[in-house]
Amino acid sequence: MYRTHTCGELRIEHAGQPVTLTGWVQTVRKFGSITFVDLRDRYGITQLLFNESLNAQLDAQPLGREFVIQVQGNAAERTNKNKNIPTGDIEIIVNNFTILNAAKTPPFTIADDTDGGDELRMKYRYLDLRRNLVKQNLELRYRVNRAARNFLDSRGFMDIETPFLIKSTPEGARDFVVPSRMNANEFYALPQSPQTFKQLLMVSGYDRYYQIVKCFRDEDLRADRQPEFTQIDCEMSFVEQEDILNNFEDMTKYIFKEIKGIEFNEPFPRMTWDDAMEFYGNDKPDIRFEMKLVNLTKTVQGNGFKVFDEAEVVLAINAAGCAEYTRKQLDELTDWVKRPQIGMSGLIYARVGADGSIKSSVDKFFDEPKLKVWAELANARPGDLILVLAGKEEKTRKAASELRLEMGERLGLRDKNVFKPLWVIDFPLLEWAEEDNRWVARHHPFTSPKPEHIALMDDLSRYGEIKANAYDIVLNGTEIGGGSIRIFQRPLQEKMFAALGMSPEEAQHKFGFLLGAFEYGAPPHGGIAFGFDRLCSLLGGSETIRDFIAFPKNNSGRDVMLDAPSAIDDKQLAELRIDLVKEAKA
């Protein structure tokens, strides 16, 4: 056999035993007539000791970093123990060794503190995966996967696979399309989610379905997006919203206990979408800290200050304890809100002194009694700093939200080791898309209106009032899951398609299979999908999901290791009847 033990297995009780190990050479350290080698595999590191009797063999077959070797010897207690690794009490006195495969010098150091940049490490991802930090991330991902499966199995969910080659129905993000060789000029799409399939499974009577599944979206990338990503996808029949929230709150608590040893003894708080937008400026609020948005619009307008008087909204946040910010720090914050990503024209501030007096950057227009009203509304106390933004409603609310998060970051209030989940509920069912001049689904076309709002589907003028029977689970300012109670009756689904501007013919062409299924006894049903990569990254304390995917794409959607996507040859194009040959040659 190649090995009797792994490199992370041996302990002091193994001292005196003969062992055979295999692995990769991490380091080689020569001290006169003896040589120490750290041998690494997936499980850990073990120190090897080559004494002077093996020196001649080592001279003839020198070991280098990342050589794959096999050693035979005896475990022995180390004289200078290493308490930083589990195997630090022992070493292997090597009797003989075999080089199984030599290695070129790696292009970067395979260690926690590597000298390789992102692009270089992604090009040699198979080497980067050897690093301990990356290995720990993938181990965490596996444990989250296993915990989710164990929980769902305990609740009677069945893992059912759904197809990857499906029909393109562009309603959300752009599809990745796949040409069909056997069906000329026709294309499959890769699924953005298994949404319609899991609803069909409910029609089929499989009342508790789940799948940890790959999904695909051809959209612009950022830290928490990849062109292919993984969902914990779930659906249940004969349920209401409360059933879904309770079940998957339990799953989240179970995962946290299994992975982090953290127990949530209280129910997750719930917040309406309206309140989230009003007090946090976004629908995925970070509730690890307060600093809520305060609307000063009615209070500050009519005082001759043009910036406020012409604004659609004036919003403030209270940065507790920041009254002593220097002019340099305030100028820096002003520059921060003026950045193109935020897009504001300036920042107003008011300091609450230790004696309760208030001074602002607009004292010319607001005397101290008026400023004290600001302080009361913002719940500002002596030593606090009130920061104010004004402008168009949507832009200003988004900017105030970003400023709140930035101040939370600067004040150390966004501790990645503190976890604050919540449910956001009562989303709008529809939103107006200016570019398309039509109503679009806030979530997707299969989301049901809240029961008390179904009647509003008949009144176009009230579409903006309709609330969805939808919910998101948010963790530390990141949406980790979302779902809804689904439409399960054909007439209501047809009304939804009509609200989105689909003709009956278009609805039949795109979703006739689903509408037909609803006529054969579709049960009430609903579900949720968790962003598995996002959940893993938050549990692992990282801001990017790429760290928790074995072979991720870069920010341009490329796999620089495989050099994909890439052109295909003329023969393949001809077989697919895609006439790009001339264009490619040109």
Image (cartoon, rainbow, N blue to C red):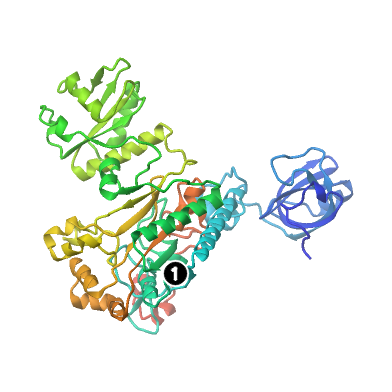
User: In the displayed image of the protein, which residue is found farthest to the top?
Assistant: 355
Instruction: Find residue 45 and report its horizontal and vertical position in percent.
Output: 71, 49
Instruction: Find residue 320 and report its horizontal and vertical position in percent.
Output: 35, 27
Residue drawn at (35%, 54%), measured in percent from left and top?
472
User: In the displayed image of the protein, which residue is found farthest to the right?
Assistant: 53
Residue drawn at (61%, 50%), measured in percent from left and top?
131
Name the side, left or right, on which 214 lies relative to 311: right
Q: Count neighbours of disc 1 (C-alpha within 10 A) and say few if under 14, some if 14 to 19, many if 20 or more.
A: many
Q: Which residue occupies the foreground of this view, 516 or 391?
A: 516
Name the side, left or right, on which 286 lies relative to 449: right
Residue to which mark 1 is pinned:
209
Mark 1 residue type = Tyr
**In the rendered image, is residue 226 in sight?**
no
Figure check: 88 above or below 307? below
Name the side, left or right, on which 528 lies relative to 489: right
* SS state under label 1: strand
